[in-house]
Amino acid sequence: MSKLKKVSVIIPYREDRGWLDDAIRSVENQTYKNIELILSQGDCGVSENINNGIKKAEGDFIKYLCDDDILPTNSIEDSLQGFKKGIDFIHGKAKSFDGMINNGLVYEPPKKNLRLNTLISHNHIHGGSLMYRREVFEKIGLFNETLWTGEEYEFNLRALHSGLKIGYVDKIVYFYRLHQRQKSIGNKSNEYQDLRREQIGIIRSWYI
C-alpha cells in the first residue's frame, strides 16, 4: 500500500468524557504517518457527527474512532493491508479493556468473509474495526442520521446490498473501553435492550 495514500480518522463526540486525549494520542502514535485527524464535535447524534467529519475528510480511506476507545499503534497500517483489489471496506479483530489492555478479551468474528445474508442473520462486525474507501460514501451516501442505534450496522448492510465488497484483516485493529456509559451495553435495563433489539430487527427488515 502506497505511503502516499491518506487516511482520515474521525473522532465524533458531544463532550470530552475524560478519554478524548487518549483517543487522539493513539492516532498520533500510529506507525502509518499519512493520517488526517478530524475531531467532529457537536450536540447531536453519533451519525451526524461522523457525517460532518466525512464531509471534511480529504483521505483516500476513512475510519472513525469513538472518543472513549483507542487504536493499537499498527491499526492503520494493518487495516490498509486488507484492501486487496475489489475490496471496498474491511473489518478485523477488536480487544476490550477496562484498565490494562493486556488483560482484555479479543473479539474475533466467527465469520470473516461476509455476505449480505450472513450479516442480516447476525452482525459479526465489530464497528470500531471498520475502515472504508472514500468512494463507498460517494456511492451509497452517509450514515443514517434518523437512527438512534445500529447506525454502522445499517450502513454496512446498505453497502453489501449495493454490491460493495468487504474484506477481513486478521489483526487486532481496535481497542474498545468497557464502562457503564457505553450506549450499547452500558444500559442493561430490559426495556432499553428490548428497544435496541426491536430497532435492529427493523433495520434488518429493510434489506431482506
Image (tube, grey):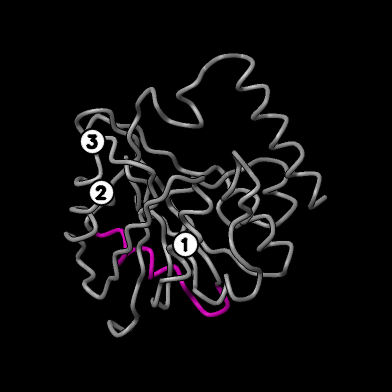
What is the span of residues highlighted in magenta in the rendered image?
Answer: 74-87
Q: Is residue 171 above or below residue 197?
A: below
Disc ID at residue 52:
1
Q: CA distance from mark 1 to mark 2?
A: 19 Å
Q: Is residue 201 above or below residue 65?
A: above
- Left or right of residue 59: residue 134: right
Say which of 63 and 38 sits in front. 38
Q: CA distance from mark 3 to mark 2?
A: 10 Å
The local crowd at label 3, few if under 14, some if 14 to 19, many if 20 or more residues have their Cα within 10 Å, is few
Q: Amino acid at mark 3?
A: Gly
The local crowd at label 2, few if under 14, some if 14 to 19, many if 20 or more residues have their Cα within 10 Å, is some
Q: Residue at x 30, y 85 (%)?
A: 4
Q: Amino acid at mark 1?
A: Asn
Where does label 2 land, which residue?
23
- Rendered image quadrant of residue 196: top right
Circle nearer the N terminus (3, 2): 3
Say which of 201 and 41 sits in front. 41
Q: Position of residue 17 (x, y in %)?
A: 29, 35
Circle nearer the N terminus (3, 1): 3
Where does label 3 land, which residue?
18
Residue lying farthest front?
A: 43
Q: Is residue 79 magenta?
A: yes
Q: Amino acid at mark 2?
A: Ala
